[in-house]
Amino acid sequence: MKIVEAIASSNPLVGEILSLITMAIRAARSEEAKKVVESARKAIKALFTANLITIQEQNDVMLFMDEIEGMVDRGEVPPHWQQDQS
Amino acid sequence: MQRHKRNIIGVTLIACLLCLFGTGAGCKTALEPGGAYAPTNELGQATQAPDPVLYNADLSFQVAYNSLDFIFLFEKQNRTALDTVSPDIHKTVDSIRPLAVKARDEYIAARKVYRLNPVPANAEGLDAALLKVEQLLATARTALARNQPQPQTQAQ
């Protein structure tokens, strides 16, 4: 475990990604957890491989960004992003 | 079940380490022509230069956004249980929520500016906006991790 921590500390983002994956797996096998793991997987690929980022992968990210941009333009805030009023 | 979870975590960590050792960190991202970040016309000719800067920034934003989304939902759905662990979790996560909305909006605004004029100065604006989102994620994640029940350690 110390080796893992040492490698993670050499690149903070690696530590972040490892923690996120661990957290997602620990928490639940929910759709939200899957999204975190999937986006972390893509980030690892982009960071550490020289593989071509495929058309599909590019389009998936752009589609996600279009959705978020649409939300922002409409002034939408998901319920769980809103502060607790109670 | 616990052993199964540990196995999954172990396999994931090993896979990540193989990525590190096998390919080396920091390799450049190559975008396949025809994708949203390397658009081409019907003849396959590039209509604009591939933009790995925007792709990497957007991908990082996606990771951070999905992670924050997961934390916010997890905290909301498990608030009562988490309160028994520590009320600080709700307090910290709730204080991050409006900041996260602001950071999300700022990233989208910086992204629009960069897409209109993809010059280094605007890329810096994009990075700065992304950094805010990532810092909020780090704070939220720390709040959860810091307040986790500690596993029992064996005497050595």
Image: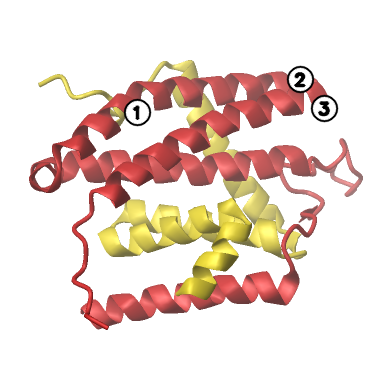
> Which hue belongs to chain B?
red
The colour scheme is by chain
| Quarter that holds the N terminus of chain B | bottom left
* Kind of residue indicated by mark 2: Leu
**C-alpha span from label 2 to label 3:** 12 Å
Q: In this orientation, does residue B55 appear?
A: yes
Q: Tell me which chain appears yellow.
A: A
Residue at image location 73% in from the left, 27% down from the top? B124
Can I make out residue A80 in this image? no
Q: Nearer the viewer, residue B135 or B115?
A: B135
Q: Quadrant of residue B24?
A: bottom right
- Mark 3 or 1: the one toward you: 1
Q: Who's the residue at 50% across and 32% down the image?
A: B133
On what subunit does the disc labeled 1 rest? B
Q: Which residue is mark 1?
A: B96
**Residue underneath mark 2:** B116
**Do circles 3 and 1 both sit on a common chain?**
yes
Rendered image quadrant of residue B68? top left
Residue A6 sits above or below residue B93 on the image: below
Q: Nearer the viewer, residue A7 or A48?
A: A7
> Residue visible at 88% across and 49% down?
B44
The local secondary structure at tag 3 comes to: helix
Q: Given the image, what chain letter belongs to the residue carrying mark 3?
A: B
Label 3 belongs to which residue?
Answer: B120
Q: Residue at x 77, y 54 (%)?
A: B29
Which percent across, then down, holds residue B107? 57, 25
Q: Which numbered disc flags the more N-terminal residue, 3 or 1?
A: 1
